[in-house]
Image (spheres, rainbow, N blue to C red):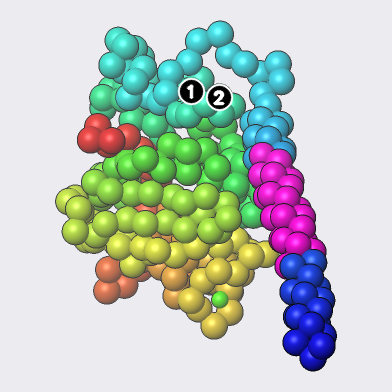
Amino acid sequence: MIAMTTKLWLLLVLTKTVSSFKEESVNFVCTKTSLNETKSDLAEIIDLKRRVTKLEEKRNTSCGTLQPSVFGKDCLELFDKGERNDGVYRISPDDGCPFDVYCDMTSGGWTVMQRRKDGSVSFKRTWTEYAQGFGDLEGDFWLGLNNIHRLTKDGSQIYIHLQHYNGSWLYAHYKDFTVNNAATAYRMNVDKYGFEGTTPEIFGYHDNMKFSTHERDNDNYGTSCSVSLHGDSGWWFNACYYLNPNGMYNFKGTGGLSYYSGGIIYMKNSVIKLKRNNSC
Ligand SMILES: [Ca+2]
């Protein structure tokens, strides 16, 4: 009798265990199904996010009616296609919106990023203006950090011409120059070991600096280089400069268009040009 009771009790316990196991199995299957559904939802969300990002990018690079009929990647490509006249051309270095540039074809297809020739354009400008560019492509201008980034992101040379008040020209040529995107505050990289020129090596001091303007201080100086010393112009100031081509025009004082080499050397004019590196 006792044995029978024990058997019944064991059967009961076994039944309960099996039932509990079944229940847990069902829960497990449900949980697994739920997990799979969550994974599927997550994949869908990721896909949607990717599509939204693409649409936003497309919207941001929407060029409206400004699509040109003819353009090249840059002045070098136009030069390679046979263009030989210096002047304004429409280019697009990537799949983004095209923009106008001044091409120096005489020197073999350089894209001009900055020029001071008569002081008719003020370089006291805001962050937004330095980002977008300003001035007259035939005269004094700044090409704009967004455009400079697009022209240099895959590797570029930079050629800096500076003219003395006596009319003679100096140059500084760097074989490796890059401007990063807006998210980095247009951080600039230049390889001072790739320098050759008739000026001293004056640009390496600015390597790895973010861009600064009078209302956005990203420099290494106690206060703002742009405001305190340099005429509210924008540049990759460190603390503060060896090269200041955006400084005040026709001004032989602190903040004038100049470079530093044991003392400040004031210059009259400047032209800065870019050329894509062929190796990329
Ligand atoms: Ca500062």
**Residue occupying the point 72% across, 61% down:** 25
Residue position for label 2: 98
Q: Is residue 143 left or right of residue 242?
A: right
Q: Quadrant of residue 32?
A: bottom right
Q: What's the residue at 32%, 56% (across, down)?
A: 190
Residue 43 forms part of the magenta stretch: yes
Work out which quarter of the rendered image holds the N terminus and state it: bottom right
Q: Is mark 1 within 8 Å of ligand 1?
A: no
**What residue occupies the far front of the structure in this picture?**
1
> Mark 1, residues whose alpha carbon is within 10 Å: few (<14), some, or many (≥20)?
many
Crowd rating for badge 2 (residues with CA inside 10 Å; few <14, some 14–19, many 20+): many
Q: Which residues are magenta?
A: 21-47
- Where is 114 relative to 84, above or below? below
Reading the image, the residue beneath label 1 is 91
Q: Is residue 139 visible?
A: yes
Image-based side of 109 in relation to 249, left or right: left
Give the overall secondary structure of the magenta segment.
helix
Quarter where residue 85 is shown = top left
Q: Nearer the viewer, residue 147 or 170?
A: 147
**Callout 1–callout 2 Cβ contact below 8 Å:** yes
Q: Is residue 121 visible?
A: no
**Up/down of 67 relative to 274, above or below:** above
- Considering the numbered disc 2 on the image, is that residue within a helix, a strand or a loop? loop
Residue 68 place in picture, x, y as percent: 58, 14
Ligand 1 is located in which of the four quadrants? bottom right
- For marks 1 and 2 on the same chain, the one whose residue lies earlier in the sequence: 1
Disc 1 marks a residue whose amino acid type is Ile
Q: Is residue 92 above or below residue 175?
A: above
Magenta stretch contains residue 189: no
Residue at x-position 56% and y-position 29%: 96
